[in-house]
């Protein structure tokens, strides 16, 4: 069944959608710091092929250092970050689209005083 999650607005510089749970994404369940996530399209929407998540990272924070077999599609919605991608680092900002191939080491570090937020699309089966 199809679903629409209506954009609700900003909270502490992070995007929020109606009826979408804000989940902690930090030291208690990952190696991320000052970060949260929302699953916009996932198992609850019965999406069999892909999942779309929104991650937000507050100033001074970072995502976990990850390496997965599956690839990722990332679209930066707001803010600026330093992206570790393999052995290189790149600055990314609002409007940038990023492809992260499978088995590539990756991690985002917020740059500046504004929260960094991005959409991440991954395969449903991973």
Image: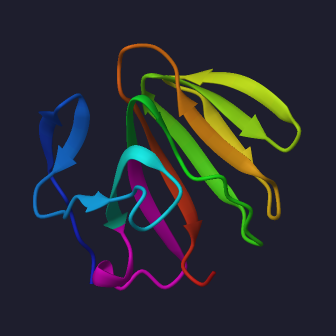
Start-end of magenta stretch:
41-55
**Where in the figure is residue 8, as x and y percent of width and height?**
10, 43
Q: Farthest residue to the right: give it.
A: 87
**Where in the figure is residue 70, as x and y percent of width and height?**
72, 70
**Where in the figure is residue 80, as x and y percent of width and height?**
51, 21
**Where in the figure is residue 61, as x and y percent of width and height?**
45, 35
The residue shown at (44%, 61%) is: 52
Q: Nearer the viewer, residue 84 or 44?
A: 84
Question: Within the image, what quadrant is residue 124 found in?
Answer: bottom right
Q: Is residue 3 left or right of residue 67?
A: left
Q: Is residue 108 left or right of residue 79?
A: right
Q: Farthest residue to the front: give it.
A: 28
In the image, residue 99 above or below residue 79: below
Residue 8 magenta-highlighted: no
Number of disc labels: 0
Residue 47 magenta-highlighted: yes
């Amino acid at each position: 069944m199809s679903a629409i999650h209506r954009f609700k607005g900003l909270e502490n510089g992070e995007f929020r959608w109606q009826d979408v749970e804000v989940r902690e994404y930090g030291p208690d369940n990952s190696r991320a710091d000052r970060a949260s996530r929302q699953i916009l399209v996932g198992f609850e929407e019965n999406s069999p092929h892909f999942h779309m998540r929104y991650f937000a990272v507050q100033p001074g924070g970072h995502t976990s250092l990850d390496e997965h077999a599956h690839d990722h599609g990332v679209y930066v919605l707001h803010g600026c970050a330093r992206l570790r991608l393999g052995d290189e680092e790149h600055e990314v900002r609002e409007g940038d689209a990023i492809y992260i191939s499978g088995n590539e080491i990756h991690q985002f570090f917020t740059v500046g005083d504004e929260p960094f937020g991005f959409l991440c699309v991954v395969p449903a089966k991973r």
